[in-house]
Image (spheres, helix red, strand yellow):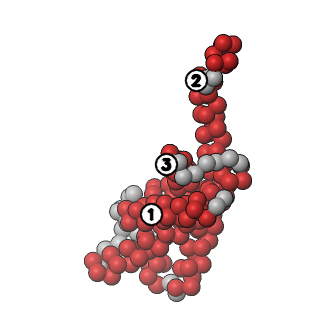
């Protein structure tokens, strides 16, 4: 993997994490967006970059590394954006849709919050590495099915 692809992965996954983190502060949606960040951030980012022709998955290792980088970055940014927005809403509006989580965010020392965010990011990187692997196999399956139905050269047309 080259630096250009890694830079694009970090940028796209950070944008995804910020958007999901901000929308995650809406009551009853936050837990679903957190689960989506844990599981689906790598496939969404990979499919977007493949459709934009900025990423080409050639090996299994690339798909796993891509999924891990995407999961780690999007999870850290999601947790940071969600924590800051939740703390600001509680401080200025005195409203909390999840009292336990808001209490943990506001009352815990900063080092504990950082350790917790990094732990969640490592878990998300592991899950998204698997999601990236599954995305690699699904994309290759779809490509194989497409190539069987739409042959490219005349020799393949003759034999079918």
Q: Residues within 10 Å of mark 1 (few under 14, many from 20)?
A: some
Residue drawn 38% across and 58% down?
28
Residue behind mark 2: 150
- Position of residue 12 in the picture relative to residue 119 (left or right): left
Of 65 and 94, which appears nearest the observer?
65
Could you tell me residue 104's position as x and y percent?
Answer: 48, 78
User: Mark 3 near mark 2, Cβ–Cβ under 8 Å?
Assistant: no
**Which element is circle 2 on?**
loop
- Mark 1 vs mark 2, foreground winner is 2
| Whether residue 40 can be seen here | no
Left of 64 or right of it: where is 73?
left
Q: CA distance from mark 3 to mark 2?
A: 22 Å
Q: Is residue 49 above or below residue 77?
A: above
Q: Which residue is mark 1?
A: 15
**Mark 3 or 1 closer to N-term?**
1
| Residue at 49% in and 48% down | 52
- Numbered mark located on residue 47 in the image: none
In the image, residue 43 above or below residue 151: below
From the image, which quarter does the N terminus lie in? bottom right
| Residue of label 3 | 52
Eyeballing the image, is 56 above or below 143?
below
Task: Identify the residue shown where x is 57% and y is 62%.
Answer: 4
> What percent of the width, then of the height, locates residue 73?
55, 66
> Which image quadrant for residue 147?
top right
Dot 2 surroundings within 10 Å: few (below 14), some, or many (20 or more)? few
Between marks 3 and 1, how big is the CA–CA gap? 16 Å
Q: Which is more toward the observer, 18 or 102?
A: 18
Question: Quarter holding the C terminus?
Answer: top right
Which residue is outermost to the front?
154
């Amino acid at each position: 993997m080259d630096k250009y692809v890694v830079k694009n992965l970090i940028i796209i996954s950070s944008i995804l994490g910020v958007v999901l983190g901000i929308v995650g502060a809406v009551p009853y949606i936050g837990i679903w967006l957190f689960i989506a960040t844990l599981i689906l951030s790598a496939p969404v980012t990979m499919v977007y970059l493949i459709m934009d022709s900025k990423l080409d998955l050639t090996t299994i290792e690339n798909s796993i590394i891509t999924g891990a980088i995407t999961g780690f970055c999007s999870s850290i940014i999601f947790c940071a954006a969600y924590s800051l927005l939740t703390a600001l809403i509680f401080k200025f509006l005195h409203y909390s849709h999840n009292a336990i989580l808001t209490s943990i965010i506001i009352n815990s020392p900063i080092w504990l919050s950082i350790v917790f965010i990094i732990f969640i990011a490592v878990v998300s990187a592991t899950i998204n590495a698997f999601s990236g692997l599954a995305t690699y196999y699904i994309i290759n399956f779809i490509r194989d099915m497409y190539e069987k139905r739409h042959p490219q050269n005349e020799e393949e047309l003759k034999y079918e």
